[in-house]
Image (cartoon, rainbow, N blue to C red):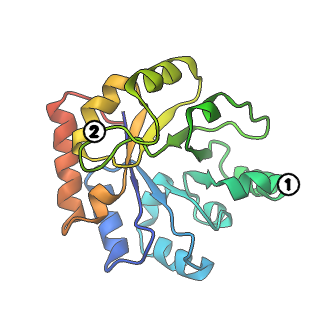
């Protein structure tokens, strides 16, 4: 399964150091989601992260930085998808440097997994909110049966997001999710890196390979 960490949306102390620590601990995919951060501030954050880790980063805004920093890819919001020509042009420019760029997006209902989009071929999509973080029960009208059925039928790779913590790993794997995206389970802890290491250990205990 893919183990993905999504950044804190706000500014946190020693953030570049913490992100680097996650990479050093084994994180392969990091989503930089900071819509309120200026282009300049985003560049400063990326510059503070060692260059050899840039290929593990997917950026949610200021997509032009994906080309400048040779990032793994870009995440498209509803707004980006609506701006068809501008987004198409940005992707073409990025692909001049990286033909293997990853393009991801977010869905909030199962029906979207079956909608045909001629403009984009997503590497994977987030589906949310899946879990109630307090008890790992399903949210948003999702049921285990509906999720299993949809994931079996769709050709889209689906990542569980929303309420994802260590308690959700086994259930998400059973359902057939391609991976999990951790957010609050990391950033609301006093020691995000220590928490990430616990998550790695949980995957190992469950004998679930991590991509």
Kindly tell me whether residue 117 is visible in this rendering.
yes
Vertical arrangement, residue 77 with respect to residue 10, above or below: above
Q: Disc 1 or 2, which lies upstream in sequence? A: 1
Residue visible at 32% across and 59% down in the picture:
184
**Picture quarter with the N terminus:** top left
Kindly tell me whether residue 96 is visible in this rendering.
no
Nearer to the camera, 190 or 137: 137
Q: Position of residue 38 (x, y in %)?
A: 59, 80
Q: CA distance from mark 1 to mark 2?
A: 38 Å
The picture quadrant where one finds residue 142 is top left
Callout 2: helix, strand or loop?
helix
- The furthest residue to the front: 141
Q: Position of residue 9 (x, y in %)?
A: 45, 69
Q: Position of residue 128 (x, y in %)?
A: 47, 44
Q: Is residue 210 left or right of residue 92?
A: left
Q: Position of residue 29 (x, y in %)?
A: 42, 49
- Residue count near mark 2 (Cα–Cα under 10 Å), binned few <14, some 14–19, many ≥20: some
Please identify, in this view, whether the residue under mark 1 or under mark 2 is nearer the observer: 2
Residue visible at 60% across and 46% down in the picture:
105
Vertical arrangement, residue 55 with respect to residue 204, above or below: below
The picture quadrant where one finds residue 186 is bottom left
Q: Disc 2 designates what residue?
A: 168
Nearer to the camera, 134 or 191: 134
Q: Which mark is residue 85?
A: 1
- Residue count near mark 1 (Cα–Cα under 10 Å), binned few <14, some 14–19, many ≥20: few
Residue visible at 40% across and 49% down in the picture:
162
């Amino acid at each position: 399964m893919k183990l993905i960490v999504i950044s804190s949306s706000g500014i946190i102390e020693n953030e570049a150091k913490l992100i680097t620590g996650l990479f050093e601990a084994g994180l392969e995919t990091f989503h930089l989601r900071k819509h309120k951060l200026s282009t300049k501030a985003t560049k400063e954050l990326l510059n503070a992260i060692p260059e050899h880790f840039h290929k593990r980063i997917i950026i949610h805004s200021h997509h032009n930085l994906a080309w400048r920093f040779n990032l793994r890819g870009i995440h498209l919001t509803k707004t980006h998808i609506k701006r068809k020509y501008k987004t198409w042009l940005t992707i073409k420019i990025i692909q001049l440097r990286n033909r293997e760029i990853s393009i991801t997006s977010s869905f909030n209902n199962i029906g979207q997994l079956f909608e045909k989009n001629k403009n984009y071929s997503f590497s994977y999509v987030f589906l949310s909110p899946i879990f109630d973080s307090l008890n790992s029960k399903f949210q948003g009208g999702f049921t285990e049966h509906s999720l299993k059925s949809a994931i079996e039928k769709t050709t889209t790779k689906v990542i569980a997001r929303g309420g994802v913590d260590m308690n959700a790993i086994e259930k998400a794997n059973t359902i057939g999710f391609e991976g999990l995206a951790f957010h609050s389970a990391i950033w609301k802890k006093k020691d995000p890196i220590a928490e990430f290491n616990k998550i790695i250990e949980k995957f190992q205990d469950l004998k679930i390979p991590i991509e």
